[in-house]
Amino acid sequence: MAGIVESDKIDVGFSGKRCIHSRNCVLGDPHVFVPNAPGQWIHPDAASVEKVVAIAESCPSGAITYIRKDGGPQEQPPAVNTVRLRENGPLAVHAEIVLDGETFYRATLCRCGASENKPFCDGSHTRSGFAATGEPPLKDTPALEARNGPLKVTPTTNGPLKLEGNVEIVTGTGHTIHRTQRTFLCRCGHSANKPFCDNTHKKIGFVA
């Protein structure tokens, strides 16, 4: 399910294909994002534009987007590009993401290997019993000269996610474990060095 719900001050977009049901929206304001509604479930006029914007930008998957029509600022890329490790779950990326010729700011990318919507997460980590810590050991890496800018994400053929650009890998509790301008992150689900690739995808015959 995808589409745009229009209102006088703000249009709200939703992509069911990208949604991972984090529920930030329905918990943020159940009058704007009505849970379990049989029909239209997004009502942009039920709260202030600022609140709708804040809830949309809290959506980690980027399934919810918006276009302001009141003259206010549109969504901007973050000051620091981050990849957050979700415990037993996906990679939550917040950056000026460049992927498959598109540019967007929020995405949750599969790292269990089981998603049927690769490179995006579709919740398969829960069904497959994927286990991966969101708190790996911290590394002592030097600060980057710049912390933002375009982050090119390339799902390599039958292999890891290649990230090119300024990025910080962050634990679920907010500790930075790695700062880099180029890295390869596991997406087969079997690396012994998660979140980083250790070439296990070749041993197990990972296909993507």
Image: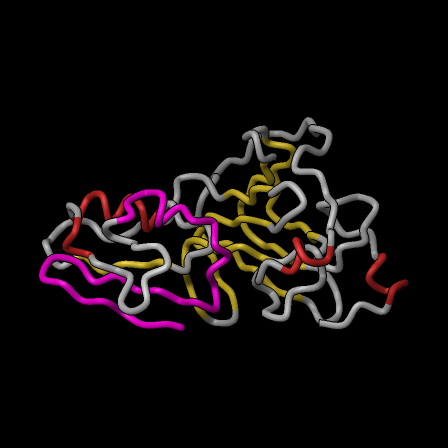
Classify the position of the N terminus by image quarter: bottom left
Residue depicted at x 29% and y 62%:
41
**Where residue 201 sits in the image (x, y, percent)?**
82, 62
Residue closest to the eye, 118 or 82: 118
Classify the position of the C terminus by image quarter: bottom right
Residue depicted at x 83% and y 46%:
192
Residue depicted at x 36% and y 43%:
27
Residue depicted at x 21% and y 62%:
11
Q: Is residue 198 magenta?
A: no
Residue closest to the eye, 163 or 171: 171
Query: Horizontal placement of 24 versus 191: left or right?
Result: left
Farthest right residue in view? 203
Query: Horizontal placement of 90 versus 59: left or right?
Result: right
Residue closest to the eye, 102 or 93: 93
Q: Is residue 25 magenta?
A: yes
**Where residue 112 sits in the image (x, y, percent)?**
70, 56
What span is in magenta?
Answer: 1-30
Query: Horizontal placement of 116 versus 145: left or right?
Result: right
